[in-house]
Image (tube, rainbow, N blue to C red):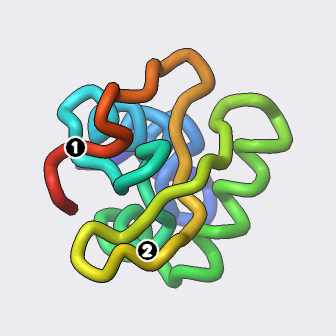
Amino acid sequence: MTEQNAWGGPTDEAIVDAVRDRCREGRTDLLEGGVPSEVLADEFGMDQHAMQDRLQTLVQTGRLVRVRGAAPDTYRPRPSYRPPDEPVDSDGGSERL
């Protein structure tokens, strides 16, 4: 079960851990890799806009960085997120989300 904050949503730590796990497993977008907000929103059962707000806060506090990603199925660019200390794979992204 995911750790929850006082409002019943995932903690910041749970979100960062999910992003880190996906990056380490290679389940990232194309280009610079990273995990898009819609994937995380689905994983945590959250509204996409609420997840985007949480991710922006994590970027502002230095817990995540925003990178250029591309959806593997459409190649459309979209913002993605990764921990600042995670290296980018040599092929940009990896396993298709």
Point 53% across, 80% down: residue: 48
* Residue 94's disc number: 1
Q: Quadrant of residue 88?
A: top left
* Residue 38's disc number: 2
Which amino acid does the dot numbered 1 rest on?
Ser
35 left or right, relative to 47:
left
Point 27% across, 27% down: residue: 24
> Residue 5: percent from the left, percent from the top?
56, 51
Point 67% across, 59% down: residue: 54
The crowd level at tag 1 (other Cα within 10 Å; few <14, some 14-19, many 20+) is many
At mark 1, the secondary structure is loop
Distance in Å between CA atoms under marks 2 and 1: 17 Å
> Residue 52: percent from the left, percent from the top?
64, 69
Residues 79 and 17: in front is 79
Residues 44 and 90: in front is 90
Residues under numbered marks 2 and 1 in contact, where contact means CB atoms less than 8 Å apart: no
> Residue 4: percent from the left, percent from the top?
46, 51
At mark 2, the secondary structure is helix
62 left or right, relative to 71:
right
Precedes in sequence: disc 2 or disc 1: 2
Placement of 30 over or under 21, stated as above or below: below
Query: For the C terminus, which image quadrant?
Result: bottom left
Which amino acid does the dot numbered 2 rest on?
Glu
> Residue 55: percent from the left, percent from the top?
65, 55
Residues 57 and 32: in front is 32
Front disc: 2 or 1: 1
Point 84% across, 42% down: residue: 60
Judged from this view, the residue extending furthest toward the right is 60
Q: Quadrant of residue 59?
A: top right
37 left or right, relative to 65:
left
